[in-house]
Image (cartoon, rainbow, N blue to C red):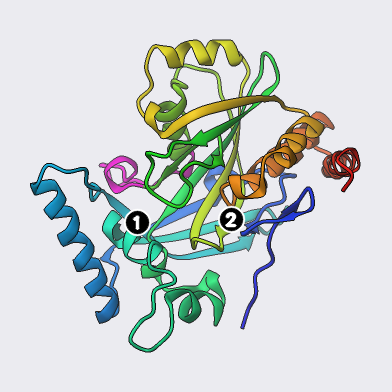
């Protein structure tokens, strides 16, 4: 049995496992290889019956004119493999995906603690009795791209609070600045080219925060994580808008945002480690999405390293700030 360690910050253990990355260096776009196999994810017979029941229920709601969950096309994660390059030992990540849809995702995500005929829950059988990183593809019908955004003109970090209208375990929680799940309709290039996680991050910023393609953007992929509570993979990005500030973004939002309904409030916090970690500590632990604290911590580390001329030892500035935050709060 393999137990994956859990990210801990400001004295709190989260349900997030950082699979790759420590924030000191980015993962280059060319070093992320997304392989897509157009093969439908397959469920064991009993779990397939759960999926059929979900589809029937949603179709019935739609026919009655009631609110229902739309079945969009997405991906199942077959595997995530990290190797090292020959020269600088830089990480090379290979992500292998299969076909899945939203009902596939619901089938396992809302039923992780449901008993099967064998007496075991999905969590017990596939996540706790073995390495969750090696879970079968039908257990991983979601891959999220999460972005921590900083405004360059006024040096603010943006925290977004998910709306109660959003379906899923992270509704009504503080989360990344913007996030999107990989979707076949949006992210699979029509010309047969490879899927780009960087492109998905840009889509998230546009759809949720009105950051346009014409805006100057400094975007870096910092790592990958696994939400051990909900069994969802995530990519962690840091983004800096050098020419925008809080006021400019808030003004844009008043004029319309594609997915404005996904968030019900925002917090712009000074982007220095003491302020960001203080904000993390001041919000109740249960008010955070599992992997959000890890994302913002890695973004802080990357910012410190860049300010120090790419000296990886600057990561310890963030650790020192964490100690100050704990001391100020009597922890």
Q: Residue at x 78, y 29 (%)?
A: 272
Q: Position of residue 111 (x, y in %)?
A: 38, 68
Residue denoted by label 1:
75
Crowding at label 1, few (<14), some or many (≥20) Cα neighbours within 10 Å?
many
Q: Residue at x 58, y 11 (%)?
A: 247
Residue 219 in the image: above or below residue 57: above
Tell me if residue 188 is in the magenta stretch.
yes
Q: CA distance from mark 1 to mark 2?
A: 17 Å
Tell me if residue 11 is in the magenta stretch.
no
The image quadrant that residue 296 belongs to is: top right
Say which mark, if any, is on residue 158: none
Front-most of 148 and 324?
Answer: 324
Residue 54 in the image: above or below residue 164: below
Q: Secondary structure at mark 1?
A: strand
Residue denoted by label 2:
225
- Secondary structure of the magenta portion, mostly? loop
Q: Position of residue 327 (x, y in %)?
A: 91, 42
Q: In screen coordinates, is 71 left or right of 27?
A: left
């Amino acid at each position: 049995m393999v137990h994956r360690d859990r990210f801990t910050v400001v004295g709190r253990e989260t349900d997030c496992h950082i699979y790759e990355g420590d924030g000191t260096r980015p993962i280059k776009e060319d070093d992320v290889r997304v392989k897509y196999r157009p093969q439908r994810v397959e469920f064991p017979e009993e779990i397939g019956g759960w999926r059929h029941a979900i589809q029937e229920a949603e179709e019935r709601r739609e026919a009655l004119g009631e609110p229902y969950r739309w079945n969009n096309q997405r991906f199942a994660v077959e595997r995530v493999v990290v190797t090292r390059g020959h020269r600088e030992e830089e990480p090379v990540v290979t992500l292998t995906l299969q076909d899945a849809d939203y009902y596939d995702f619901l089938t396992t995500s809302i039923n992780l603690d449901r008993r099967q005929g064998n007496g075991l829950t999905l969590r017990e059988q596939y996540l706790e009795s073995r390495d969750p990183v090696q879970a079968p593809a039908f257990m991983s019908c979601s891959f999220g791209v999460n972005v921590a955004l900083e405004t360059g003109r006024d040096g603010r970090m943006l925290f977004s609070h998910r709306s109660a209208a959003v379906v899923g375990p992270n509704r009504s929680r503080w989360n990344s600045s913007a996030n999107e799940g990989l979707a076949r309709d949006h992210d699979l290039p029509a010309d047969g080219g490879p899927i780009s996680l960087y492109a998905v991050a840009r889509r998230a910023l546009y759809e949720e925060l009105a950051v346009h393609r014409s805006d100057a953007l400094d975007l870096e992929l910092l790592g990958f994580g696994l939400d051990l509570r909900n069994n969802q993979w995530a990519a962690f990005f840091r983004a800096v808008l050098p020419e925008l500030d809080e006021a400019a973004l808030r003004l844009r939002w008043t004029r319309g945002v594609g997915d404005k309904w996904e968030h019900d409030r925002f917090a712009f916090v000074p982007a220095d480690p003491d302020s960001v970690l203080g904000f993390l500590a001041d919000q109740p632990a249960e008010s955070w999405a599992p992997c959000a604290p890890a994302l913002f911590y890695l973004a802080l580390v990357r910012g410190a390293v860049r300010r120090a001329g790419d000296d990886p030892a600057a990561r310890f500035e963030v650790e020192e700030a964490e100690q100050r935050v704990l001391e100020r709060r009597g922890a």
